[in-house]
Image (cartoon, coloured by chain):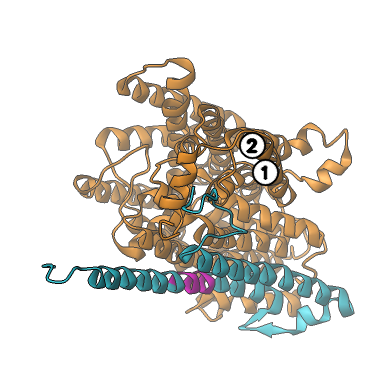
Amino acid sequence: MSDNGVKRSINIFRPLQGTMRGEVQVIALLLAACLLAVVGTQVGIWVLEESIDGFWLTELVFFNLPIHFWISGQFLPLLFIVLGLVFNLWMDRHELRRMEGTIRFRATGRKKGEVP
Amino acid sequence: MVAKGVQFIPLLMVAGMFLLFIVSGLGSKMRQTSDYGFSGSYSGRVGSGAAIASNWMSAASILGLAGLFYLKGYYAMAFVIGWTGGYVLLLVLMATQIRRFGKFTAPDFVGFRYESATARTLVALISIVISVIYCVAQFRGIALLVSWLFGLQYKEAVLTGAALLVAFVVVSGTLGVIRNQRLQYFVLITAFVLPLMFINRKLGYFWVLPQFGYGEAITTLQEQFGFFWSEPFASISLFQWLALCFTLMFGTAGLPHVLSRFYLAPSMRDARWGVVWGLFFISLIYWSAPAYGVLARLFDARAGNAFKLPDPAQADLVTLTAVTQAGLPVWVVGLLVAGGMAAAFYAAGGLLQSGAAAFAYDIYPRLIRPGATDSDKVTVAKGVFLVLAGIVMAFSLNQVGLIAEIAAVAFALAGNTIFPAFLLGIWWSRTNAAGVVTGMLIGVLITFSSLLLGDLVPLVKVIFPLTSSAFIGAPVVALVMIVVSLLTRPPSDEMVAFLIRDVHDTGGK
């Protein structure tokens, strides 16, 4: 129960104030990117397969590999690593801010003449 | 591919690699503690990542994936994306929160979060079933390698492999060997990638990064043999491919032995960064695995079998056949076999131990013998380990499928049960025991529905294929959990307060 009498709860669709709200926004963004990348690339590959008897899948070569092998076998795992990196950097930054905020609060919250 | 006799040099290399792991494990024994069979060395983010990757590597990664590429081509990319994408789900949705819960096993977590012994017991049972299924895949890998090493037939190799595994676990346990997972990872990745570099070099391809070099083999297959890889969805529909991919993702984020890694990270930051490093190390394997499948196809084509339907029973050994057909020195073959054996042995041993621990610590003292002492539990764990090994061995005697496909069933079960239980347990405080128990029971039914009801209702096989049921199954289970939770009593105020105060970063508000 919060101070205003409203019962509080955890719900990813209604994040509470604090870092949780920002965290949920970042999570939603990263998961959307992940979903779009996986489904979007496969739909794209399917379209290429369906068009001109898979001509483009034979002709398009990237980093020595047919385009669909490169996208699914190399690029997507790399993208997942980058998404993880972005999430961790964001989380580190916010943890640092929160810690700084706590230190500032402690510093300003000290009474006059109080020995730290 | 049964060898003609005992392969002495590869056998010596296998023995040498296990000896190295045991000695290094004994060296680190004094510095670590072990609980529930989940021990390991964790210092720093890279170390945590190597431990996560080493824990993940199994016969499915070293042998199974290449076999699937060889046999089914692009279809196998669903495994690469599913198994790596699952770590993104783990990282953003669970890693930090699981670390904050501070519980050591999946049954521990569920029992605490849902304040229910029933939910805890159910998760323990599901964990045991997952361990058994996953272990059947490992036993197949062990049997194929043992068959090659000793020149045995498949069934004899299963029995020999099982005996060797049990002996290895007993010896390691008696000596108190701790897994040095960082060393293991770096040895295994070397054993997997080095032979690939040698093959590429021998064929005149770009060998420094064989993960890209094998593209020339694809071109050669097209231009010289008329073998094209340009129909990725010829044998499987887009829906089936996505269903498999997302099932593996959800399963990765729900496998008990994967989730347990996060409880052991020294801090939340290490837990998060460990996942990213772990994902990078795992990706090194998956960037390389397709190359073995493609190169094995090239060697087939050179032998005049470009369009011959490959033998599924032998597909799981294509990493080995590719290396032997390339005519590489026997020590290179030995290195690869030793890596495969080590990955399968440690995966199977760990799974059997965690399954035995789930029974001994979560089921035995609650349902069979309340008041059991710690000594009783240890004795039961040892007995159950042997029983589970016997069950897995019995299932493995018949060649039921490819390594990766058998493993996928375990992922489907985890994705349909433990994944939604953890996800909602962390992110929706209203989820309660009734909801999670009902949901997980439905999840079990969904996982095996194509076996149980598939002949009666053909649509079930389309919606919930055995290896790909969690794509539709996991959302259905989550919905059931939500509906049942809303219709029944909410969790205690203490649990909701714990979630707000200790699990999520709400500033304590």
Crowd band around label 2 with a 10 angstrom C-alpha radius: few (<14), some (14–19), many (20+)? many
Residue B365 image position (x, y, % from top left): 42, 21
Question: What color is chain B drawn in?
Answer: orange
Q: CA distance from mark 2 to mark 1?
A: 7 Å
Identify which amino acid the numbered label 2 is placed on: Gly
Tell me which residue sits at (42%, 56%) in the image.
Answer: B52
The answer to whether marks 2 and 1 sit on the same chain is: yes
Question: What color is chain A drawn in?
Answer: cyan
Picture layout, residue B208 above or below residue B404:
below
**Residue matched to label 2:** B435
Does the CB distance between marks 2 and 1 fall below 8 Å? yes
- Is residue A83 located in the magenta-colored stretch of the structure? yes
Secondary structure, magenta segment, majority class: helix
Q: Nearer the viewer, residue B65 or B484?
A: B484
- Specify the label residue B482 is tagged with: 1
The part of the chain drawn in magenta is: A81-88
Identify which amino acid the numbered label 1 is placed on: Ile
Q: Quadrant of the C terminus of chain B?
A: bottom left
- Is residue B307 located in the magenta-colored stretch of the structure? no
The number of numbered badges drawn on the structure is 2
Element under label 1?
Answer: helix
